[in-house]
Every structure is written in C-alpha cells, then in structure tokens.
Amino acid sequence: MSFKESFAFNFVDEVELVKMIKFNPYYQKISSGANLYAEISGEKYLNLASNNYLALANDSRIIKAMKKALDKYGASMCGTPVACGNVDIYESSAEFVSNFLGLEDTIFYPSCYQANIAIINSLVKPSDVVFVDRFAHSSLIEGIRSTDCKIKPFKHNDVKYLEKLIKNSKTFENKFVVTESVFSTEGSIAPFDKIYDLCLKYDCVPIVDDSHGIGVIGKTGKGILEEKAIENYKGIYTASTGKALGISGGIVSGRNNIIEFLRYNSSSLIYSTALPPVLIAGTIKALEIIGNEGEKLVQKLAQNKKIIYEKLQKNGFNLTKSDASICSIITGSNERTFKVCKSLFDKKILTTPFIYPSVSKNKGVIRMIPRIDLEKVQMDYIVDSFNKIKQQNPELFA
Amino acid sequence: MKTIELIKKIIVENIDNSIIIENNTNLKKDFNLDSFDVLMIMNAIDDEFSISLEDDDFQEINTPEEIVSLLQTKYGVL
C-alpha cells in the first residue's frame, strides 16, 4: 500500500458517506467574507457556521483601523517577535489586552491553537500532572501529550470528580488544571469559579481557553473571568481572536513572571513569524468596541440564541444543554449528521457538522452560531427549515 | 467487594452511571470508548489498587474479566 493509499484509508468511512449522500460539508469554496450571507457558487447561504458572533469581522470601524495599520506597517514584519518583529504596537496592545482582561501581561501568538500547544509544552514537565476536562479542545490535548507528563482527564465540568483526582495525586512536582470556558460543540460553560477555587486550595496552576467566551460571555463581554466574577486571577488565560473578535491570532495573558518566561522559552513564539501588526490593530479595535458596547452586544446575541433555541426545543428537536450563545442539534451518527447538514445546505443554510473525533463516537451535532446580525425573518427561516426537514425525513431526528 | 465487581463499578462511575456491564462486556466495542475514557478507567484503577498501570497495558484488553486477569497476573492484585 502506498503512503497516499494508507493515509486515505483512515478516512474511508467518511469518504464513502460523502459519496453516498453526494455532499461534502467540509472545505466549501466560499467567495465572500464571513458575512451574514456567504456566497458559494454564486448563491447566497445564511452563514451560521462562522464564529463571527458579533459580526465584527465585517465591521467598518475595524476594517478602517486595519487599513491604517496596513499602510503604516505593511503586510508582515517578516521576522520573529524576538528578532525584528516586536513593533511598538505589540507592546501598547499587550497592555491594552491585559487591562481589558484585568491581567498583568499578554503575548500574541499566530493562533490560539499554536498558543495552547506552546504554553503547555513550555511549562509542563514529565514529572508533572495535568488534569484536563475530557472534552477539552484538541490544541490543549495536543499540548499536554507533547510533554510526557501524567494525564488525568476529568469528567466534563465535574468539580467533585476533579477534586477527587487532585487529592489522589500528591506525588507530582507541579499540578495543572486545563479546561475551556465555553465548550464550543455544545455550548456548556465550565464552572470555572469552582475549578479556580480548587486550584487555589490544592496549589494547581489553572489554564483556561476562553476562545468562545471572549466577547460572548460576561455581563459586558469580557469573557469567563467576568462571567464567573474572578478577580486577581493567578493562572494562565488563552483566547483566540478569530471568533467573536472577528480577527485572527491567539492571546496568552497572566502574571508578569509567567508571560516573561514564555517570551524567552516558548519555541512557537520565538521561531514563528510575528503576528502581522494589521491583525493586532484589528484586535485592539474589536476590544475597544466590546469595551464600549459590550453589554448591548452580549444581550442581543443571547436574545438571538434564546429565540432559536427555544423555538427548536418547542418543536421537539433534541439540543445540547447550552448556556452560551451556541445552538447545537444532536444528530448522533456520522450519517445522520452529514444528512442533516446537507438538508440545511439544500435550504441555503450553512452549518458546522461535528463528528468523531471532534465529539465522542456517535454523538454528532450540527452547530449553529446565532450571530448578532440575524433578524427575525432569518431566525424564523431557520426554525421553519428544520421543521420541513423533519417532516420530510423524520428518521434523521428519531 | 470482589475485584471484578470493583472493576465494573469503576468503569460505570468513570464512563456513564446509566450503563450496565457484564464480566465479558466488550467495552471498546459496545460503548465506543475513546482514549480518554480508557485513561480515566486506568487512572481510577491505579488509585484504587495503589498500582501504576503502564500505557500499553490496556491495548489488548476489552472486558472487565480481562482487566482482572491483568491485575492478578502482572500486578499481584487478589
């Protein structure tokens, strides 16, 4: 068997499924931005797949700020931050982000995926133990697995289970607790206040990925620390700027000494071309907007979610228990998940199907982001479309 | 409690309290266990019997009775 054949062999079930239903939900060729309607093959699709929660990716104020930065700094610094990429905007922006979050210092990575792997790989040693929520994001798990440490997964959002694990782990040099704030396939929010209390009680270092929380949860959109009223946070905070903030990149914030350590010991940062200044400028403008209008934005987003979620639930659809602004319909098998996704696509609605390994086996879901720019007419159309699909194919939702 | 009953209790507590398992239930096949499920069971067994299972111990193991057999032969658990 050639390399190509053996590699493809891993995807044989999904490939057959795609052939059978004549639809591949992945890598759709989109000819527009992350607007409310995405253009595919000349047709407009209601875009519930993008994480553009607050429609900031298309906000004219952000685009203007980014154009200005592009004129000043050009497309890229063509160098690592440690060499020639540490432009002035990095330092002022780090301070801005830190103040926004209420933390001491911040560094920027090319992506949060890269940031999560990098910080865990830099901080965790083989003699350490990491307690990780069993549904944590792939980047966190990849980071943990790269360290040869002891891995102790805990039941999803189960604080009692976590405490028992910590109590039984006295022989390790350092202890870390790793979780997400908002679990993005289902929309649950971690009881991070309680997890943080355990970390303080048992001397563990908490690492929280707030990628789907920043701009979305907390009274004014400041994310998990505001949502759970955590002040003077001593742990490590990471987030993607490519979700609600509408840009691209990763931020890592925390105490001065930890961030300074990462500046000189995180190979992903040291050896990667610095995040282009244009993206930093966009991030700052997005945070400025959230800082000024956050409460209003969060409320409208939550309202959209409530409308869609409750109507679908009332019409008998099985949704994940979601506390954040995410609506996920439980579809189960890969086949049902792809078929529901295709039926929605046929009705010009773009959604994200999650199958194993993104979720547990046979626990597939169709995720929709109830973005802020949805109006009543579109929300009615979404619910109506689901009802019609269910009427025509009841077996998909049985 | 017999070792086999203890193992089944650990599995249920760590995977799903609603599942019913027999001594010869094929765990990976019947419950679609992923690598984290297996890790959670292994960690709980470590804690319960004060042993340290090796990473590849569970590679060929599928049922509760096979787990007990491994614990008895390799780790001297009675």
Image: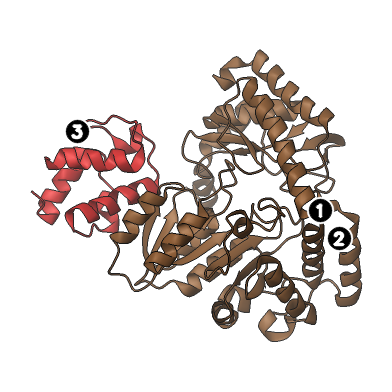
Q: Secondary structure at mark 3?
A: loop
* First of labels 2, 1 by sequence position: 1
Residue that numbered label 2 is attached to: A62
- Label 1 packing within 10 angstroms: few (<14), some (14-19), many (20+): many
Colour for chain A in the figure: brown
User: Which residue is located at x 81 percent, y 69 percent?
Assistant: A281
Give me the disc on residue A56. Answer: 1
Amino acid, disc 3: Asn
Colour for chain B in the figure: red
- Badge 2 and badge 1 in a common chain: yes
Q: Nearer the viewer, mark 3 or mark 2?
A: 2
Residues at badges 1 and 3 in contact (C-beta under 8 Å)? Answer: no
**Residue A393, image x and y in percent?**
63, 16
**Residue A82, image x and y in percent?**
66, 84
Q: CA distance from mark 3 to mark 2?
A: 61 Å
- Label 3 packing within 10 angstroms: few (<14), some (14-19), many (20+): some
User: Which residue is located at x 27 percent, y 69 percent?
Assistant: A171
Residue that numbered label 3 is attached to: B23
